Amino acid sequence: MDKRTFIKLSSLAGAGVVAMPLVSSLIGCGNAPETPEGATEDPPSPGFQLPELGFAFEALEPVIDSKTMRIHHGKHHAGYVRKLNAALEGHAMEGKPLEDLLAAIGPDDTGLRNNGGGHFNHALFWKVLTPPSESSRPSGVLADRITASFGSQESLLDAMTQAAGSRFGSGWAWLVQDENQPDRLFVCSTANQDNPLMKGIVDADLQGRPILGIDVWEHAYYLNYQNRRTDYVSAVLDRINWSEVSALMV
């Protein structure tokens, strides 16, 4: 399919991210806000910021243990944010919204590709995860689009599990909204920290608006699941807040 211009992203905010001006309109994590006029405190550090989780580290147990969550968020994701800010110093894309940055980079822009993708992908992952007490099922427009695109919710979950399980090495499995046919959803996977926003990197048939991402890097699951990746993916799919997924659509 010929992919042209990515859908202009609407401004969204939600639980699990720091309240700030939305430099990333899809996931709500971006540059630090400026200090308001007349404020006396020191301004925040410039650059992209690590979003807070919308739940406690142990809230997803036993699906994801608290130790894995602490390392994943506080070490891995924080590292991507730090390295992204370093890669942007003096770069032509410095100060650009995160989606614009990801859409514009090419395969040789290694620092922005790996760390910009790592920041976006993880922020989206945290946004759609939820404790079991707040779990939900797809409803409304999202449910209709899932049925039209996959036949049933069960078929969607099977497709996500298959995409995640068949991804060789590290990467992500995605539920994506087609930019040219908004009623159409599709499932795909990408390597490393690539994602469907990266027009200059991923194939045209993988491009679109990611509304659900599952991390299948080993650091996301190995403490509890070892090499049982599909068990991890199946368990994580039971901790999805489908209301948040629905809110990410246009």
Image (cartoon, rainbow, N blue to C red):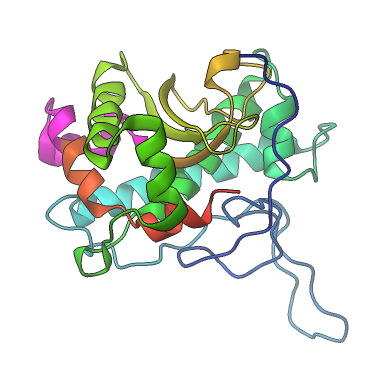
Q: Residue at x 57, y 13 (%)?
A: 203
Image label count: 0
Front residue of this view, candidates 7 and 181: 181
Q: Quadrant of residue 221?
A: top left
Q: Residue at 58% across / 44% down in the picture?
A: 82
Q: Position of residue 121 (x, y in %)?
A: 48, 39
Rendered position, 50 above or below 218: below
In the picture shown, does residue 83 fall above or below 67? above
Q: Which residues are magenta?
A: 213-231
Point out residue 87 in the picture as x, y percentages from the top left corner.
Answer: 69, 33
Residue at left offset 12%, top offset 41%: 224
Left or right of 163 on screen, residue 183: right
The quadrant of the picture occupied by the N terminus is top right
Residue 158 horizontal/vertical position (percent): 22, 30
Taking 52 as reference, is 93 left or right? Answer: right
In the image, residue 159 sits, relative to residue 79, either above or below, namely above
Image coordinates for residue 148, horizontal then vertical, percent: 40, 35
- Residue 202 visible (yes or no): no
Residue 235 visible in the snapshot: yes
Give the residue displayed 32% in from the left and 17% down from the top.
Answer: 167
In the rendered image, which quarter is residue 127 located in? bottom left
Residue 5 vertical position relative to residue 224 in the rendered view, above or below: above
